[in-house]
Image (tube, grey):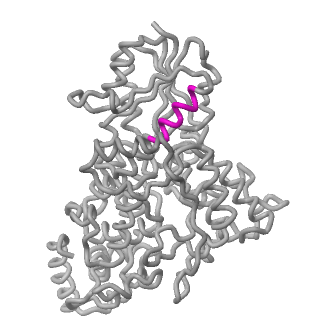
Amino acid sequence: MTGRVLLILGDQLAPEHPALAALDAARDRVLMIETAGEATAVWSHQARIALFLAAMRHHRDALRERGWTVDYLDLESEAPEAPAGLEHRLAQTLRRLQPSELWVMEPGEWRIERLIEATAAQASVPLRWWADPHFLCSRERFARWAQGRKSLRMEHFYREMRRAHRVLLDAQGGPEGGAWNFDADNRQPYPKGGPGAIPPPARFLPDAITQEVLALVARRFADHPGSLTHFAWPVTPDQARTALRRFIEHRLVGFGPYQDAMWTDTPWGWHSLLSSSLNLHLLDPREVIAAAEAAYREGRAPLAGVEGFIRQILGWREFIRGVYWLDMPGLRQANHYGHHRPLPAWYWTGNTRMACLREALTQTLAHGYAHHIQRLMVTGLFGILAQIEPAQVSDWYRAVYIDAVEWVETPNTLGMALHANGGRFTSKPYVASGAYIDRQSNLCKTCEYRPKEKTGPRACPFTILYWHFLDNHRLALRANPRTRPMTMHLDRWSEAERQALRETAQDLLQNLDRL
């Protein structure tokens, strides 16, 4: 029998794990597990698999340099015929080591938490959970905040977090600049001539460990979607801090006004590209928030952009995690509109005639990345308008993005993009016609479809399906003050016009793979 074993999961790679201070390096040990089952739970992008494995292996070596014994079960040692799953390798290890206790920090996925509980119980190994100090709001605190509320709204939560953590407050304790939210200043499209020169984000050449991982993934997961050609993501805390400094010093200044803008061949825009480092715990959100606030205090970035960036981290990120743990496991089955159409095959290839989707999908397959408006108002928007089954869309998001962990991707996709939970934490479905994409980008200029046309062979599928969505749900939308204006134009249509729309939409919906 060995001493205590600390299991560190692939999204728990903070340099200072809270349990390490309570362990004895002479008799206790760390356990880290790679398994094909976690790469195939959804059909994961090759870059997503590589990011997790490369970051885990660097973390292993850092722990060993600090004197810790690390039992590291890599993919190469996993028998191809063995059951593919974390539970199998964990059970084997618990039988081999017979530890006095298994220690684990709260995972980022409900399934993994249940799996670890069951595996430890079957092995008769006492299990101790550790709270995750990475987040600024614990699961318990969020549950207390949500208790008794008829609806959950991020804006209310965000203001409480600002006060609690003294972020962007003036000397009197009020919001800096006299307002809590400057979102209205942060919705600009790029200038008509394009975004101009944007300082590039930090990118990192793969070292020997990462190169080894890239070769392994290319060999072992060759049939998975995506490319490894452009892999240059941070895989260590030092690299993540370099990426943070690059963003704060050179890119935060343009983030605010253009965070919702899209443009051809501009995959990064002014965005931070820090989500994967945050979600793997290579970066502490407190450090990110403090750096952004300091940039404002020192006059290096405007308040509106800094507030918008901090809201994503201190507000939305913390809020969405709380919602996830509050609503699981039922959240995974949410399907408010009863949508059951299959995900079009071109979501995995980018082979579509719709320019906006082609741009977002090919970028995603190349890099494992798309920014929030591409996810919400292009790929997600099409998902809700085309009546695609929410679980299939959610699984796709978890598969193709390098920053995807279930606690953030599932509620964002099901609740925000697809409104599949019926407005649990949003006041309206986020639906729009092709006119929105045209306003926020140049993508419609090269598309064979026309965003302003809703009938005929060149009518934009987004526009057709938007009006079809309003027609299908006009009574519910009319009853909501936020969406009532959307239905007013439709109310002026004749029945013949509505019937023509329905027929056009049904033909399109039955031929989604041909778009």
Closer to us: 64 or 419: 64
Q: Residue at x 37, y 74 (%)?
A: 477
Is 60 magenta? The answer is yes
Magenta segment: 54-64
Image position of 205 with respect to 31: above or below: below
312 displayed left or right of 37: right
**Residue 193 visible in this rendered orientation of the protein:** yes
The stretch drawn in magenta includes residue 109:
no
Left or right: residue 311 versus residue 109 is right
Residue 261 image point, x, y percent: 51, 76
Q: Is residue 322 visible?
A: no
Location of the C terminus by quadrant is: bottom left
Task: Check the image and report above or below for 49 versus 423.
Answer: above
Report the magenta stretch's main SS.
helix
Give the tally of numbered discs: 0
As drawn, the residue found furthest toward the right would be: 171
Looking at this view, is 471 or 7 the one in front?
Answer: 7
Residue 270: which quarter of the image?
bottom right
Q: Quadrant of the N terminus?
A: top left
Give the side of residue 66 with respect to residue 106, left or right: right
Q: Is residue 68 above or below residue 418?
A: above
Please report the residue visible at 31 percent of the width from the left and 37 percent of the height from the top.
36
Q: Quadrant of residue 21?
A: top right
* Position in image of residue 443 (x %, y %): 39, 81
Q: Residue at x 75, y 52 (%)?
A: 166
Say whether residue 280 is left or right of residue 387. Answer: right
Residues 322 and 498: in front is: 322
Where in the figure is residue 188, as x and y percent of width and height? 56, 80
Q: Residue at x 34, y 39 (%)?
A: 38
Q: Residue furthest front?
A: 208
Front in this rendered view, residue 445 or 429: 445
**Residue 129 locus on image (x, y percent):** 51, 26
